[in-house]
Image: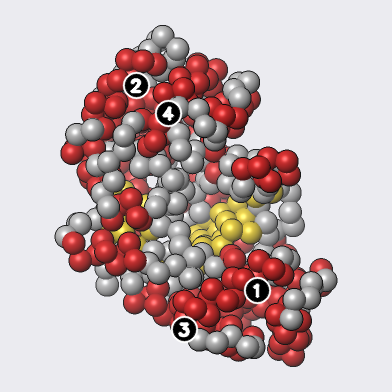
Amino acid sequence: MKKFMGKNFLLETKTAKKLYHNHAAKMPIFDYHCHIPPKEIAEDKQFENITQIWLYGDHYKWRAMRANGVDERFCTGNATDWEKFEKWAETVPHTLRNPLFHWTHLELKKFFGINKILGPDTAKEIWDECNVKLQTPEYSCRNIIRMANVHTICTTDDPVDSLEYHRQIKPDGFEIHVLPAWRPDKAMMVEDQAFFNNYVDHLGEAAEVEINSFADFMDALDSRHQFFHENGCRLSDHGLETIIAEDYSEEEINKIFKKIRKGNNLDTVEIQKFKSCMLYEFGIMDHSRGWTQQFHLGALRNNNTRLLTKLGPDTGFDSIGDFEIARPLSKLLNRLDLENQLAKTILYNLNPRDNDLIATMIGNFQDGSVPGKIQFGSGWWFLDQKDGMEKQMNSLSTQGLLSRFIGMLTDSRSFLSYTRHEYFRRTLCNLIGNDVENGLIPNDTELLGKMVENICFNNAKEYFQFEK
């Protein structure tokens, strides 16, 4: 019987162990999509306790705590940090077979050297040990990032963001790249006219222009796109239920924009046409500056109206959706490709039923200009666990080139989540190791070791070319 989370955790074969320990483990982390606040990196924040760095903003943990019968005040409410940690510790033993059980103990082991199982009986000693370490300079935000061997971080930023913290980090000698990523979702939210009009006003202020027409709106966005580019951004991201790709005319879009700016609500057809236009225009912008565009597809968000009203979005009430993905996605990518305006693209699906759909879709638009120009993004959100990652890599392997895959990302708000890269790397090595043991691929250590190193880091570094 294997020891829980020992040296060879998730590694079932001799080949897997060699691939992980000799190749994957040493590679730096290229975290090209996350939600870490750049302000905390700029200020090199020191967290007061384990709850602040571990439980604040972590809707994965909140969902588990609620399922375990924990009252909301211990998740997002006014309970003390110790009380919140204590309730999490009581929940952890009930997360067996949930990836949270693995992530929790990987993070305790990696960053704090703690090998005990977190539970009610160990909560206080683990709380004390973590908090003592968190008070030392070695556990500032920047040193935690260094501890994880991170090479590059791409945050998630709105077009109106001043990027003041990225600009503060860049000249102060921090050796790890911290770059912005453009997330323009709010510039498409015309289903809420009051919100959208307020956003347009903020955009005009940020771009220092007066927005009176759709052309002005696009000029302001392009100005901000250029500003992001000047501050190192080479990557955009869109969080959507599905791609929208309805037909529209320039005249229609101008009329729609005028209508909403007058304070009138749009009908469903007008909303769809406007969003279709915006996705196309954003694609053109990204291509014009040599960026990569990302599409995170398939989340059914804010299902619980009562708690959305009380707590706001991104608090743990989202789920997998069942939207039509293929036809509109193909239509948008095809239009951009026909006009030779298709940027490098990463596609993420949240519903596992869409794995082969995405894996085959990317093959339609590879053009030989860049290895893996169109990427099948790693297992995301509800799928960033062993089963989800294996299924994603199996679909990519079957329908495309796993060897050109740009690997894992954290998609997290926590500085302790870099262990997700370790979890991914162990899963990758185990997948390949099992194929070797079963005679499905050759036992060529040099070939396989290089492939693993590329997927873990080299492919992403070459794909994005942020340093050039």
Kind of residue at badge 1: Asn
Pointer 1: what residue? 197
Q: Could you give the CA–CA distance between mark 1 and mark 2, rounded to whole angstroms?
A: 46 Å
Picture mark count: 4
For the residues labelled 1 and 2, say whether their Cβ atoms are less than 8 Å apart: no
Q: Position of residue 29 (x, y in %)?
A: 31, 48
Percent x, y of residue 135: 23, 33
Q: Residue at x 59, y 75 (%)?
A: 200
| Residue 170 can be seen in this image | yes
| In this view, the mark in front (4 or 2) | 4
> Crowdedness of circle 3 by 10 Å Cα count: few (<14), some, many (20+)?
few
Q: Which residue is mark 4?
A: 81
Mark number displayed over residue 127: 2
The amino acid pointed to by label 3 is Glu
Q: Secondary structure at mark 3?
A: loop
Left or right of 289, for residue 45: left
Q: Which residue is mark 3?
A: 208
**Does the residue at mark 4 contact the one at mark 2 (Cβ under 8 Å)?**
no
Res 80 quadrant in image: top left
